[in-house]
Image (spheres, grey):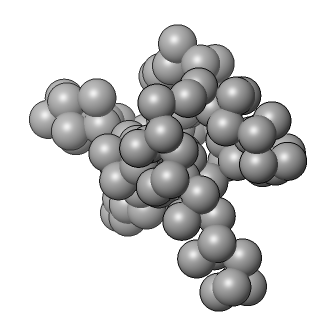
Amino acid sequence: MNQGLQSEMLRHVNDWQHSGLSQIGYCQEKGISFSKFNYWVRKARPSEKSTQGFLAIKVETNAAQRSVHPVMELISPRGIRLNFYGAVDAEFIKKLL
């Protein structure tokens, strides 16, 4: 990643937060692409980083537990689907949610 670009955009995010302007207003004033700026705003938020995407997990199963068809499917409000092809412990599901 270009460190110069990263530091410049994070500086813009900081300046915007102290400006009192909307994101769109700040972008128009500075001549910055709103979509690019919004990307950096989201990237700069540590709380969102921890709630977006997937965490890597390792689940060990034996061949007898596997199925050709999912035994359970979880669908998030954003449409993300998780299919489970073997027995799943309820405590594991609670940790995912």
Q: Residue furthest left?
A: 91
Q: Position of residue 42 (x, y in %)?
A: 54, 45
Relative vertical location of residue 15 with respect to residue 75 in this rendering, above or below? below
Number of on-image labels = 0
In-front residue for pair 59/44:
44
Say left or right for 10 vs 25: left
In-front residue for pair 91/54:
54
Q: Position of residue 58 (x, y in %)?
A: 38, 64
Say left or right for 64 vs 41: left
Q: Position of residue 3 (x, y in %)?
A: 65, 86
Q: Residue furthest top?
A: 77
Taking the spot 48% from the left edge, 39% from the top edge, the residue there is 19
Relative vertical location of residue 46 with respect to residue 4 in this rendering, above or below? above
In-front residue for pair 69/15:
15
**Quarter in which the N terminus is drawn:** bottom right
Taking the spot 76% from the left edge, 48% from the top edge, the residue there is 30
Please say whether residue 48 is visible from this viewpoint.
yes
Q: Position of residue 13 (x, y in %)?
A: 53, 53
Tell me which corner region of the image, top left, top right, bottom left or bottom right, holds residue 11.
bottom right
Taking the spot 58% from the left edge, 77% from the top edge, the residue there is 7
In-front residue for pair 14/62:
14
Please say whether residue 66 is visible from this viewpoint.
no
**Quarter in which the C terminus is drawn:** top left
Tell me which corner region of the image, top left, top right, bottom left or bottom right, holds residue 12.
bottom right
